[in-house]
Image: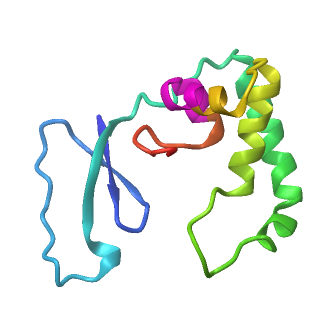
Amino acid sequence: MWILASADGRRMPVSSCGAIRLVYPSAPVSSRLLILSLIPTGFGKVPHDHPLRSIKTLLDQALTHIDWKLSLIYSERGREFIPPERLLRALLLQILFSIRSERQLVEQIQYNMLYRWFVGLSIDHSLI
């Protein structure tokens, strides 16, 4: 089973032998399909007994309590930025796995699927 990302960020299941319905460019943006990548649904399959799974659950709960403070940081103007939640997750990985520098942290996140899952990045999200 594969999933397909749409323009509005929704992910829809697509059978591996099924056809993809093409949508005309004149259709509303919310209904256009962007074929960014076909991602196997197995991405993010972290074992249930892995320590990062329980840490991620605790971190998700903690971040919901400070979400209102983090939302004050967001700006509607300027360049695209890295969400503070992702930065906090990445820095926690750096501490937990004794990664010596931020450059090494970025390198590790680029190719380690477990780290990408923890930070909340998709398989094809670029860091640079």
User: Foreground: 121 or 103?
Assistant: 103
Q: Which residue is drawn at 73% across and 21% down?
A: 99
Q: Which residue is drawn at 79% across and 30% down?
A: 55
Q: Which residue is drawn at 60% across and 17% down?
A: 47
In this view, 123 is above or below 53: below
Q: Does the stretch in magenta take in 65?
A: no
Residue 54, picture quadrant? top right
Quadrant occupied by the N terminus? top left
In this view, 100 is above or below 127: above
Residue 106, picture quadrant? top right
Determine the main secondary structure of the stretch shown in magenta.
helix
Q: Which residue is drawn at 87% across and 67% down?
A: 69
Q: Does the stretch in magenta take in 114?
A: yes
Q: In this view, does 72 lie to the left or right of 76?
A: right
User: Foreground: 120 or 27?
Assistant: 120
Query: Which segment did they paint magenta?
Result: 107-117
Q: At which x and y percent is residue 29?
A: 31, 78
Q: At which x and y percent is residue 111?
A: 48, 25
In this view, 111 is above or below 85: above
Residue 90, picture quadrant? top right
Q: In this view, does 47 lie to the left or right of 59?
A: left
User: Foreground: 2 or 104?
Assistant: 104
Q: At which x and y percent is residue 95?
A: 82, 26
